[in-house]
Image: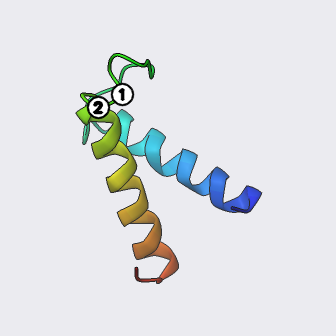
Amino acid sequence: MYTSEIHAKAIIAAALISSHAVEIPQLPSAALEKDNTAAIRLRDLTEYVYRAIVGTHG
């Protein structure tokens, strides 16, 4: 992953959180790894928006 891609995804994730499109995920821990649905939703939406902007599929 390139630095520009990481930067873009961080901005997208911040925008999703600040617009209240997703709840703020908890910091990762071993106990919450499988139950952290907020983090999973944030990751999935960030990827979706990034791919929509860049125009790639998959």
Q: Choose between 40 and 5: the one closer to the eye.
A: 40
- Tell me if 1 is positioned left or right of 46 in this view: right
Q: Residues within 10 Å of mark 1 (few under 14, many from 20)?
A: few
Q: Choose between 37 and 12: the one closer to the eye.
A: 37
Q: Which residue lies under the disc numbered 1?
A: 33
Give the percent coordinates (x, y) of residue 34: 29, 31
Within the image, what quadrant is residue 2 found in? bottom right
Within the image, what quadrant is residue 17 found in? top left
- Tell me if 34 is positioned left or right of 2 in this view: left
SS at mark 2? loop
Q: Choose between 11 and 36: the one closer to the eye.
A: 36
Q: Give the amino acid type for the residue marked by disc 2 in the picture.
A: Lys
Q: Which residue lies under the disc numbered 2?
A: 34
Whether 30 is drawn above or below 2: the answer is above
Q: How many marks are shown on the rendered structure?
A: 2
Whether 49 is drawn above or below 20: the answer is below
Q: Give the amino acid type for the residue marked by disc 1 in the picture.
A: Glu
SS at mark 1? loop
Between the residue at mark 1 and the residue at mark 2, the CA separation in whole angstroms equals 4 Å
- Identify the residue at horizontal 59%, vertical 56% (top origin): 8
Q: Residues within 10 Å of mark 2 (few under 14, many from 20)?
A: few
**In which quadrant of the rendered image does the C terminus lie?**
bottom left
Give the percent coordinates (x, y) of residue 42: 34, 43
**In which quadrant of the rendered image does the N terminus lie?**
bottom right
The answer to whether the residues at label 1 and label 2 have Cβ atoms under 8 Å apart is: yes
- Identify the residue at horizontal 47%, vertical 51% (top origin): 12
Whether 7 is drawn above or below 35: the answer is below
Give the percent coordinates (x, y) of residue 51: 44, 72
- Identify the residue at horizontal 26%, vertical 38% (top origin): 22
